[in-house]
Amino acid sequence: MRDETQPGWLLKVRGLTKIYGDPVSTSVQYTGPKFSTNICPETDAIVACAEIDFELWPGEVLGVVGESGSGKSTLVQLLYFDHPATSGEVYFRPVDGGRTNLLTLSNARKRQLRNTALGMVYQNPRDGLNFSFSAGGNIAEKLIMAGEMNVGRMRQRGSYLLDRTEVPVARMDQSPQSFSGGMQQRVQISKAIANNPPLLFLDEVTSGLDVSVQARVLDLIRQLQRELGVAMIVVSHDLAVIRMLTDRTLVMKNGRIVEAGLTDQILQDPQHAYTQLLVSSLL
């Protein structure tokens, strides 16, 4: 929930665009929901997302929903620097008071920011965990990258986080490869919050999990958010997940935001035809 005691936004995004292939002036102009495609008719370049604008407030949970190929995962991957953006501006309050466009930072500064102030939980735990390391080793890796060198403190932090996320501490020195899918996700969450980041990205974190496991993971995320006050951007195609976790929601189609507003408002009174279709499919 938005913390009104804070001085302003935590994250500001303006005109964020990612195009795969050779962009031309018409790549954005002739793609999007109006044309029901994100493929440029002139060059076949793929406009993964374009002209994305939004703000995120401290402690707020923002949902991003849409069908496969809508650009929602690309959006958080750009913000986490997994891929370079084609254009746009991203401002983050902890960096120079929000005055510096993060997309202009050096690669070394981006890596430092990922390790100290951002966290990511991917749909596939293999994208977020190193299976050649133990569960505790994965958490230690995140701490080491942020400058922690004391083994005792790292093990203590790892034990605390694994216990907090319902992973048996007795399995701390085992590889996540031997864990269930739900337990792998919980280890990934532990790693993502190891340094108490002010901003956490969750990309389809319950996809592929059994329904009962999904519920436990979602309960864990909601509880951690309340306790830590971390801001989150939650990407999902599942409106039930969005309803449970988020305060506000962005609806994406063909790489564009077609509707934005309070989650309850969007689910109860959707305005865009595409959002209405999504909501009706939930009923």
Image: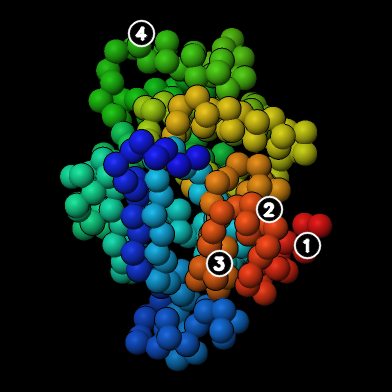
Q: Measuring 67% from the left and 74% from the top, which residue is drawn there?
A: 273
| Nearest-to-viewer mark from 4 and 3 | 3
Q: Measuring 59% from the left and 10% from the top, which residue is drawn there?
A: 170
| Nearest-to-viewer mark from 4 and 2 | 2
- Which one is earlier in the sequence, the residue at label 4 or at label 2? 4
Q: Which residue is mark 1?
A: 281
Q: Amino acid at mark 2?
A: Leu
Q: CB atoms at circles 4 and 1 under 8 Å apart? A: no
Mark pair 2, 3: CA separation: 14 Å
Q: Which residue is mark 3?
A: 259
- Which one is earlier in the sequence, the residue at label 4 or at label 1? 4
Element carrying mark 2: helix
Element carrying mark 3: strand
Q: Which residue is mark 2?
A: 239
Q: Quadrant of the C terminus?
A: bottom right
Q: CB atoms at circles 2 and 1 under 8 Å apart? A: yes
